[in-house]
Image (cartoon, helix red, strand yellow):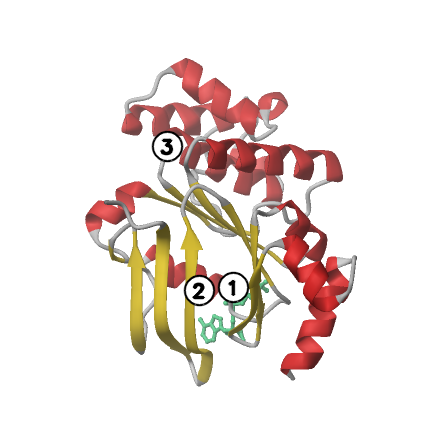
């Protein structure tokens, strides 16, 4: 039987340089839902996502992804990892990139066009990736990930710098993917994005200070505004 968690992390410790970024972190990510990883810049969100993607050296603890160790070759095919640093070819156009990724994944031209449309880049289909903004490049990477149709999406700040309409559209896309049974872990430092998630992990200084639904967060802190809820929790944790 499938484990109900797509990701299970037990007592993870990660040291980067001289800093203990994740001191002793235990958390799970439920399947078939959108989990937000929220917290201020530098709190360790990217490091945690890297550990789940299997590309982070870990000092101690275990990271189980889709019922096996993170980073094993079979898991890499089933996990779509979209980073802030774009992983597409700058000297190709958006569609040329997507055709390339479509060929790799056995998808067709229609699927490539649909992926470009899904990330709101139809009007940039013929633009060189080198000429796009950082947020647009991230979305080209996201479109490439969509073509691979992974079970688990690890999205590191996919909505950074986007206007409200595009942000809303992307969150609707994430919801659709989750309703198709995909698992999404989406990091952001914008607290109002927490309200769009099924579950929210609030991080501060390498620790999870809340693992909850948005409604539970509001009820537990007595704050309607999730930014205020975070501040209440952060003060309590300090
Ligand atoms: N290559 C590195 N070497 C040493 N320390 C690093 C390295 N990369 C990150 N760090 C440190 O690890 C900590 C966590 O960084 P991380 O990128 O995981 O945070 P984050 O929450 O994703 O931040 P942001 O929202 O700004 O991307 C920070 O204190 C950062 O300075």
Q: Which mark is residue 149?
A: 3
Label 1 C-beta lies within 8 Å of the nearest ligand 1 atom: yes
Q: Which residue is mark 2?
A: 48
In the depicted structure, whether residue 123 falls above or below residue 37? above
Label 2 C-beta lies within 8 Å of the nearest ligand 1 atom: yes
Taking depth in this image into account, of 9 and 150 the one nearest to the observer is: 9
Which secondary structure, mark 2? helix
What's the residue at 59%, 27% (across, down)? 121
Q: Verify CB contact (< 8 Å) between mark 3 and mark 2.
A: no
Q: Dot 1 surroundings within 10 Å: few (below 14), some, or many (20 or more)?
A: many
Q: Kindly report the distance in space between the C-alpha atoms of the residues bearing marks 3 and 2.
A: 22 Å
Taking depth in this image into account, of 230 and 16 the one nearest to the observer is: 230
Q: Could you tell which of marks 3 and 2 lies nearer the N-terminus?
A: 2
Q: Kindly report the distance in space between the C-alpha atoms of the residues bearing marks 2 and 1.
A: 5 Å
Q: Which residue is mark 1?
A: 45
In the depicted structure, whether residue 225 falls above or below residue 61? above
Tell me if 54 is positioned left or right of 32 in this view.
Answer: left
In the depicted structure, whether residue 75 falls above or below residue 170? below
What's the residue at 61%, 43% (across, down)? 135
What's the residue at 65%, 84% (across, down)? 238
Q: Which quarter of the picture shows residue 98?
A: top left
Which secondary structure, mark 1? helix
| Image coordinates for residue 191, horizontal then vertical, percent | 69, 57
| Image coordinates for residue 39, horizontal then vertical, percent | 61, 65
């Amino acid at each position: 039987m499938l484990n109900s968690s797509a990701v299970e992390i037990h007592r993870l410790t990660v040291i980067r340089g001289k800093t203990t970024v994740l001191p002793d972190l235990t958390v799970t990510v439920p399947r078939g839902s959108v989990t937000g990883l929220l917290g201020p810049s530098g709190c360790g969100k990217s490091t945690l996502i890297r550990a789940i993607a299997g590309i982070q050296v870990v000092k101690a603890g275990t990271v189980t992804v889709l019922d096996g160790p993170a980073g094993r070759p079979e898991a890499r095919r089933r996990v779509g990892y979209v980073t802030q640093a774009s992983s597409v070819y700058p000297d190709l156009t958006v569609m040329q990139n997507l055709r390339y990724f479509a060929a790799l994944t056995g998808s067709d031209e229609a699927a490539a066009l649909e992926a470009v449309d899904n990330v709101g880049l139809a009007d940039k289909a013929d633009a060189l990736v080198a000429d796009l903004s950082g947020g647009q490049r991230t979305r080209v990477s996201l479109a490439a990930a969509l073509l691979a149709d992974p079970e688990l999406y690890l999205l590191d700040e996919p909505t950074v710098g986007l206007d409200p309409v595009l942000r809303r559209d992307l969150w609707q896309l994430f919801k659709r993917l989750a309703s198709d049974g995909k698992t999404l872990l989406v990091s952001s430092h914008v607290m109002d994005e927490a309200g769009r998630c099924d579950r929210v992990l609030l991080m501060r200084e390498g620790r999870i200070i809340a693992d909850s639904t948005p409604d539970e967060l509001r009820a537990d802190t007595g704050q309607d505004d999730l930014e205020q809820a975070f501040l209440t929790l952060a003060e309590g944790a300090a």
